């Protein structure tokens, strides 16, 4: 049974990776191209500190935008599908009497909120090639702190819901656990340092730089 579930998770991850590649190729790659052009414009401005310094390009933009992007998101999707299937096998039947499809949808929603959405609200990704190069380590560290805090709080909320389910009912226990999660994570995210490294540059100056380049 577990092997079938993991195989289905791998297949779902492969499908998700393929869809993610198509979306990224059609919508994200043009944004990356504009971001690279924007960074090239920044390097033409005087006295700019922390701008990325490019070394030798290992792969061309054509390879990155096609084979590299497709391979990367496909492997990531397959890995996430397998991980989701394993977590489903471990947790199904231990957090209440919920039908399998409903539980998988609930598990996916909780994972999306805890692992991605909440940390993203605090630390949205900079456009590619935009940001201060000397703060990458600090920004990555704070983002990981946000992810770990959110995931640990989500696990604690699930434990709380399971504990209260017999006395309060599954629905009320879930609402109380969600409220507890918000009460814990909101002040933590508010206390974490903010990051805002996308400068506000006058549009006319940007046009002049692009024209002179």
Image: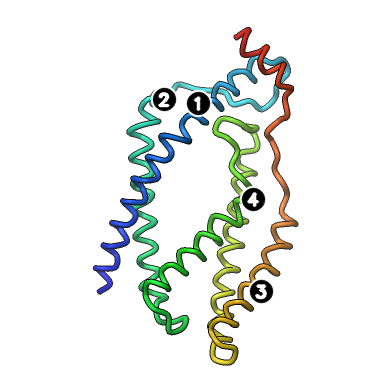
Q: Nearer the viewer, residue 187 or 145?
A: 187
Residue sitting at x 63%, y 44%: 139
Label 3 neighbour load within 10 Å: few <14, some 14-19, many 20+: some
For the residues labelled 3 and 1, the Cα–Cα distance comes to 42 Å
Task: Please say if the residues under marks 1 and 2 sit with CB atoms less than 8 Å apart.
Answer: yes
Pointer 2 residue: 61
Pointer 1 residue: 33
State which quarter of the image contains the N terminus. Answer: bottom left
Q: Nearer the viewer, mark 4 or mark 2?
A: 2
Residue 181 image-quadrant placement: bottom right
The kind of secondary structure element at disc 4 is: helix
For the residues labelled 3 and 2, the Cα–Cα distance comes to 46 Å
Q: Nearer the viewer, residue 208 or 115?
A: 208
Of pointers 4 and 2, the one earlier in the residue sequence: 2
Up-down: is 75 above or below 8? above
Residue 207 position within the rendered picture, expressed as x and y whole percent measured from the top left = 66, 15
Residue sitting at x 57%, y 23%: 53
For the residues labelled 4 and 2, the Cα–Cα distance comes to 29 Å
Is residue 177 toward the left or the right of residue 205 in the image? Answer: left
Q: Nearer the viewer, mark 4 or mark 1?
A: 1
For the residues labelled 1 and 2, the Cα–Cα distance comes to 9 Å
The kind of secondary structure element at disc 1 is: helix
The kind of secondary structure element at disc 2 is: helix
Of pointers 4 and 1, the one earlier in the residue sequence: 1
Of pointers 3 and 1, the one earlier in the residue sequence: 1
Pointer 3 residue: 180
Pointer 4 residue: 142
Residue 200 image-quadrant placement: top right
How many badges with numbers are in the image?
Answer: 4
């Amino acid at each position: 049974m577990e092997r079938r579930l993991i195989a289905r998770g791998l297949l779902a991850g492969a499908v998700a990776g393929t869809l993610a590649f198509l979306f990224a190729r059609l919508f994200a790659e043009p944004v990356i191209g504009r971001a690279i052009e924007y960074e090239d414009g920044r390097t033409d401005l005087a006295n700019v500190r922390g701008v990325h310094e490019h070394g030798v390009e290992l792969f061309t933009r054509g390879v990155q935008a096609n084979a590299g992007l497709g391979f990367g998101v496909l492997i990531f999707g397959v890995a996430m599908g397998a991980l989701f299937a394993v977590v489903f096998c471990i947790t199904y039947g231990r957090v209440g009497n919920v039908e399998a499809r409903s539980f998988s949808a609930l598990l996916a929603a909780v994972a999306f909120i805890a692992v991605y959405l909440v940390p993203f609200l605090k630390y949205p990704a900079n456009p590619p090639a935009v940001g201060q190069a000397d703060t990458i380590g600090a920004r990555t560290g704070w983002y990981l702190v946000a992810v770990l805090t959110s995931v640990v709080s989500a696990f604690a909320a699930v434990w709380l819901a399971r504990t209260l389910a017999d006395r309060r009912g599954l629905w009320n226990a879930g609402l109380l656990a969600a409220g507890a999660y918000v009460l814990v994570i909101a002040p933590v995210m508010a206390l974490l340092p903010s990051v805002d490294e996308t400068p506000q540059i006058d549009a006319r100056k940007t046009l002049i730089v692009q024209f002179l380049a």
